[in-house]
Structure formats: C-alpha cells, structure tokens
Image (cartoon, grey):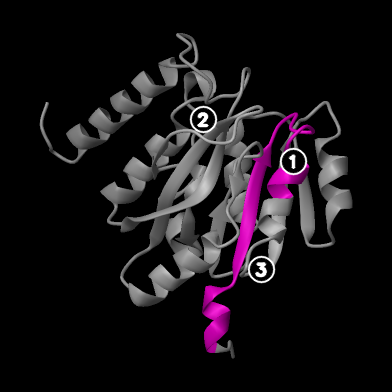
Amino acid sequence: MSKPEDTMTYTAVIPAFNAADTIEQAIRSILSQTVPAQQIVVVDDGSTDETAELASALSDFVRVIRQQNAGVGSATTTGLNAVATPLVATLDADDLWVPNKIALQIDYLEQNPGCDGVFGHMRTFGEGEKGGEIGPGWSRTTMLLRTEAAMRVGPVIDPPGARGDMIDWIARAREIGVRLDMIDEVVSLRRIRPGSLSYGRDKARDRGYAKVAWLALQRKKQRGGGE
C-alpha cells in the first residue's frame, strides 16, 4: 500500500536530439530540485553526438532510452510511456528548471485536487545573456502533470516542421476535460539560441502551427461544433 506522500512522487522526462552541449545542464537543474525526482528519463532521439553517453554518466538516477530519430513529440511520448510514478514533469534538453519548480507545483496540486496538470511562467535567456522576457509558459519545459491524465491525452504528435507539438497536445487535453492550470511564479528558463526549434521565425518549421490549427478545427467539426 502506498504512503500518502508517494502520490506526489514524480519522474522527469527529457526528449533529446544532439543535445551534448546542454544535456548536462538540463539534468543538473533537475538534480538540484528541492523535491528530488524518483527518476530522470532521457529519450535519445537518434542523436549522432554524445548526448546519451553524457546523460548516462551524470547520475545513477538517469535512465537513457534510445530510439531512431522520430521527432521531439515521439521522444516525449516514449518517455511518458516509461513513467511509473503518479506525476510526470518534462523538460526540453536545452532548457532549465529553477530549483523550487517542482515544490511550487506539487504544492499547487495538493491544494487543488481537481487539477490534472500545472504549468508556470518562464524566463527566456540567450547565449551569454543573464535574462530576458518573462511570460506564461504553456510548454513542455514548465509542465507537471498527473501521469494518468497524460495517458488519457495520448501521444505527443510531431507536426510538419517540428513546431506546435505541445500546442496540439494541450488543446487535445482540454478537449477531453483535462484541467490544466497556470501559476504566476517563474519555474523554468527557456534557452534561445540559433539552430534551436524555438529560435526566430522559420517558414518551413512554422507549417506545424498551421497544421495544429487545422487539426483542432477538424476535431471541432467532428464534435458538431460548426463548420
């Protein structure tokens, strides 16, 4: 029989592709949490650099799962399916958590038992910069979710251009009644650098956002929500 505190244990999932430059910092930000993770699952999405080796060597709490390159959504799904704890948190391989991220979010879930998942604000930073914009982060990097709710939503789908996967996933979650809340505190740091998926505008990559919007419209039509 589980102890009451076991209901708030969590696994951290990091999808990673050629993230050798940042994976150690990402993992250390999890290891530095005031509420430690039971396990850190790094899904190496077909990297050709030393991402997997660096992750494995950093801590015994790290489990590396390797797969052929299929996209960040696929890697996230693989990680979610490996979770055995009641809660799961996710982090992009080039981002960071602030030390009290999980503590703040677990406290929120304890006070709001009807909430399935909680997000927080994030601050952007660039290479060599100390800070940047702060705003609500409806993203993989800020999420803490009840695992059973994540399973109800299903896989994280990779749209064209590899952008918009979490927008689609969060929309699908809300459509089936999963309650997702936002807290005001900064819980994560989002790295902006040339070459990353979050850097600037890109016509080819931005096709994913259009696809996500189209999929949402089709689901609305199937529910009888209009033309």
Please give left or right for residue 160 compared with residue 6 in the image: left
Q: Which residue is mark 3?
A: 36
Query: The N terminus is located in which quarter?
Result: bottom right
- Rendered location of residue 96, percent (x, y): 61, 45
Precedes in sequence: disc 3 or disc 2: 3
Q: CA distance from mark 3 to mark 2?
A: 30 Å
Q: CA distance from mark 1 to mark 2?
A: 21 Å
Residue drawn at point x = 44 percent, y = 72 percent: 107
Pair 3/2: label in front: 3
Residue range (magenta): 4-27
Name the residue type under label 2. Asp
The local crowd at label 1, few if under 14, some if 14 to 19, many if 20 or more residues have their Cα within 10 Å, is many
The residue lying toward the viewer, choosing from 61 and 24, is 24
Q: Which residue is mark 1?
A: 23
Q: Which residue is mark 2?
A: 158
Name the residue type under label 1. Ile
Precedes in sequence: disc 3 or disc 1: 1
Mark 3 touches mark 1? (CB < 8 Å): no
Q: Secondary structure at mark 1?
A: helix
